[in-house]
Each structure stands twice: as C-alpha cells, then as structure tokens.
Amino acid sequence: MTSLDDFAREKLDRLEAQGLRRRMIPTDRFSATGARRGGRDLISFCCNDYLSLSHHPEVIEAAREATARYGVGSGGSRLISGNTPLYDALEAGLARWKRTEDCLVFGSGYLTNVGVIPCLVGGGDLILQDELNHSCLFAGGRMSGATVQTFRHNDLDHVRSLLRAHRAAHGTCLIAVDGVFSMDGDMAPIDALAALAREYDAWLLTDDAHGLGVVGGGRGSSFLGKAKSDVPLQMGTLSKAIGAYGGYLCTSQPVADLIRNRGRSFVYSTGLPPGTLAAAIKALEIIERDPEMCERPVNNAARFCAALDLPAPVSPIVPVILGEARRVMEASAALQERGYLVTGIRPPTVPDGTARLRVTFSAAHTEQDIDGLVSAMRDLGLAG
C-alpha cells in the first residue's frame, strides 16, 4: 500500500459515508428509449439523446459510409492532417442553422468552453457566471485568469449590480450562461442579458448544449422570440439532441479565426472521427426538415408534469427534487425495479440539499411509456 493508495482510499471512504461515491454501470442502449442493465430491459428516462437521433437509421448509415470512406480516426489535429472535408459541411450547416457567419467544431462541449473562454478573456478582464452554470464554463473561467464573479441564478438585478461595481475596472467582460440549465431544465433570460451586455460593453456567451434541437423551433435558446437574440457567442454540443459527439461555437468569422489560431483545446486536440462528423451532418439535416419532431420532447415532458402536478416544463428536463442523496439513490433503484431507468443526481453536481431525480424526455417516448413512469412514481410517493 502506497501513500497514494492511502490518499485515494481515504477520499473514497469519505464519499461512501456521505452517500456520494459514484460507480459506473455498463448500460446497453439497444434502442431509442431502451437500456439494458444487468440483463434487464428498461425504459430510459435519463438520456440526453432528446430526439433519439443516435439510433436513427439515416444517421447510422451516414456514419457507416463515412467510416468506410475515411477510416475510423482522423489521424491528427485539425491544423495538421485531421481536418477531414466533412468539417466544412458540418460547420457551414451549424452556422446557417444558428444564423451566424461562421462556426468552429471542437472535440467536445467541455473542450469548447475551456478553449474559447481563455482565448477571449484573461488577466485584467471580468467574467460574470450564473451560479448554476455547467462545470465547464467555470473551468474555462478559472483557466482564463480573469476575475470571475458569480451571480444568483437568473437574477438580472444581481447581474446589473455586478456590472456597475466591477465593469469599469476591467478591460473586457464576458457574461456566460447556460441557455437551458442542465439540472433544472429552466432557461436563462437571454434577451435581457443581451441588453445588459450591450449597455455595459460585455460579450454574451450561451451554452446551448440542452437547447439545440428542442427549443426555439430546434434552433436553440437564442431563438425563443420573434427575432434571434443578440448573442455573439453561441456554444453547444453535438452529443445531446444531435445524437453524435463534439462541441461547437457559432460566432462571427473574425472570432472563429482567432480561436482557430489561439484556442489551445482546438489547436492541440485530435480531430473527431469522420463517422461522428457525418452522423452530426445527417442529424442536423433531419432536425431542419422535421420541426414537429423537435417539439415532441417538451410536449412529452409536459404530459408527465401535468399528470404529477409539477410546474409546466420549458425543456425536456424535469427535476424531481428529493433533497437527500441516499433517498434519491434509493428512489432510482426502486424505479429500476419497476422497469424505468431514472438516475439520481447528487452533490457536487447539484447544490447540497437538492439531490434529485433528473427525468429527461425524448421524441421517441410513447404516451404509454410516460404514463407508466407516472404510475410508478405515484406508487413510490415520489411526486403528485
């Protein structure tokens, strides 16, 4: 036993005692909503594949054809040899869909935020972050060396007060928010934040990982009104509603070119597999041609919430907050016994005292699937 092992075991024992130790469970997602664990078939209500495009036959075939044509891997970073011709088509499609001049695709959503933020702000600059932002937004902020101020969730008065107090003392200012918050399913007040950004000469970045494909007619959280919100930095992922993998930033051409040259997580990462790029291209085509499909996840969430007297959802994400970590994991296990996969979310992913079941809805869920989950949750006294 080494001191390193002792250190690790002590940390793990502490997590175990708090009910916070995580363990990975092999999960066979064998269909659009089906998941197999321990030899048992379950209906999954915990996946971010909101449109079930990861199982769409056209998407699978596109990936297969690209893999046969270009190989399994890209062979290098994008600035060396890994910039397969498929990147041009994907970035052009995303820029058109998001109505921006340009787009830059990264290896993942996390890599996007830790690459973009330090490229745009640094020492002597200011970042304002919503307290419930995704971890990668905070990681990018810390890596930048800028001063980071956290504001209360969706509190515009607090944002304004921080701008009044700190903006003048800093060179540039970035306001960063989730478009759709991944654990609560609510949305940022993007139009109002955009107005504050204009007033104080700040740049607004929205992480639309959970908005693309399912809100704003499928275009995301910057498209909820009659006109596109004034968001110069629309970031997101290809691993949720798109059903593939990767991250992206839709922005102006000069900003995209700067990040191509100076974004460290872009410059020094291997390009995505060609099959993944082709899958994303095809998935985006399907989203553009099928607006009704894009509405289905939120409609399915609404059916669930109405049945359990929960607030009407604005996204496919519905939190059922139970408070204590052990209770959440017991509830998740009880639902699994009834045939439903709904994972528990515990601190530090969510604040202390707000452990929850995070229920997510897909375009492929049937009314029978949803009503069955409602019945199981009622039987367990979890809601309604």
Image (cartoon, rainbow, N blue to C red):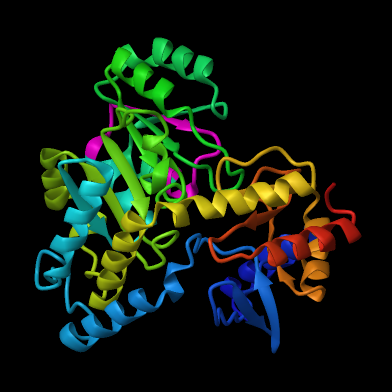
Viewer-nearest residue: 378 or 234:
378
Does residue 95 sit above or below 161 in this rendering?
below
Residue 267 percent coordinates (x, y) = 18, 59
Does residue 33 sit above or below 136 in this rendering?
below
Does residue 370 sit above or below 190 in this rendering?
below
Q: Quadrant of the N terminus?
A: bottom right
Residue 73 percent coordinates (x, y) = 24, 81
The mark total stands at 0
Residue 64 percent coordinates (x, y) = 29, 84
Q: Which residues are magenta?
A: 120-138
User: Which residue is found at the position 25% from the left and 45% from the top?
Assistant: 250
Q: Is residue 122 magenta?
A: yes
Residue 208 seen in the current view: no
Viewer-nearest residue: 48 or 269:
48
Viewer-nearest residue: 350 or 380:
380
- In the rendered image, which quarter is residue 160 located in? top left
User: Which residue is found at the position 31% from the left and 52% from the top?
Assistant: 112
Does residue 111 sit above or below 271 in this rendering?
above
* Residue 74 shown left or right of residue 149 in the figure: left
User: Which residue is found at the position 39% from the left and 48% from the top?
Assistant: 218
Residue 371 percent coordinates (x, y) = 75, 61
User: Which residue is found at the position 17% from the left and 74% from the top?
Assistant: 76
* Residue 22 shown left or right of residue 218 in the figure: right
Q: Is residue 70 magenta?
A: no
